[in-house]
Image: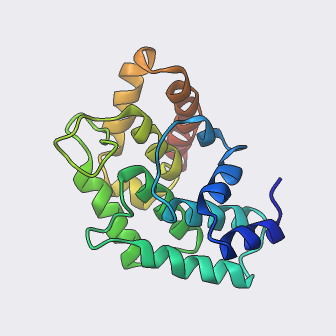
Amino acid sequence: MITLRRIERLVNERQYQRLFTELMSARPEGGLHLTLRLPAAATAITLLRLEELSQTQTTIYSQLLRVLLSQQQADGGFGDPATTALCVRALFSCDGFGSAVDDGLNYLANLQKQEGIWPAEPLRRLSADPAASVFILYQLASFPAFRSAVRFFDAVNWFDQHESQLDDAVRRLWNHAALRCQQTLFVN
């Protein structure tokens, strides 16, 4: 288990890859082989971990939030769809951040493919990527703003229809994401 002191040290030394690897190692989405953009992804996962540890009042939390907001690009994304989903989730955990969240959700909505899932890179002409898409659903399915910004049920239906074709890592994360997706049906 990574401590607050270790987080602070890795952030101050800008060891984003090590920080990201250590924080993701014990998480369900950690078994998925995606290349996420650093330092945005490391910053986002660190913010989420600090929230889980009830450490949102620390100086490092505020510092990381500023770093995360500075990583958002003009198109609303944070480099690619999966990294953007992780960053938007971190912003949601920080009680939103208005236009930063809205811009991130618009970015994801604009990249969603006709069949309901997303490409791994920010180019609509690239083929859809189940790994990136299940990561996006896992990160954001719990948030009503995400579900209304994208074609949520198209994405869920795609996974339901193609589950037997998924590789083991994607199928494992889909099992977690599917629970989040199903919970949203009962909340609304």
Vertical relation: 93 (above or below) 64: above
Vertical relation: 188 (above or below) 7: above
**Residue located at (26% from left, 46% from top):** 112
For this orientation, the residue located farthest to the top is: 164
Residue 71, position in %: x, y?
Answer: 43, 72
* Nearer to the camera, 44 or 142: 44
Count numbered badges in the picture.
Answer: 0
Q: Is residue 80 left or right of residue 3?
A: left
Vertical relation: 67 (above or below) 49: below
Residue 61, position in %: x, y?
Answer: 67, 78
**Residue located at (60% from left, 62% from top):** 16
Vertical relation: 103 (above or below) 60: above
Q: Is residue 110 left or right of residue 185?
A: left
Q: Is residue 169 left or right of residue 60?
A: left
Q: In this view of the protein, can residue 166 be seen by the observer?
A: yes
**Residue located at (44% from left, 47% from top):** 136
Residue 10, position in %: x, y?
Answer: 71, 67
What's the coloring here? rainbow
Residue 94, position in %: x, y?
Answer: 58, 73
**Residue located at (50% from left, 57% from top):** 86
Q: In this view of the protein, can residue 97 be seen by the observer?
A: no
Q: Is residue 70 left or right of residue 139?
A: left
* Nearer to the camera, 131 or 18: 18
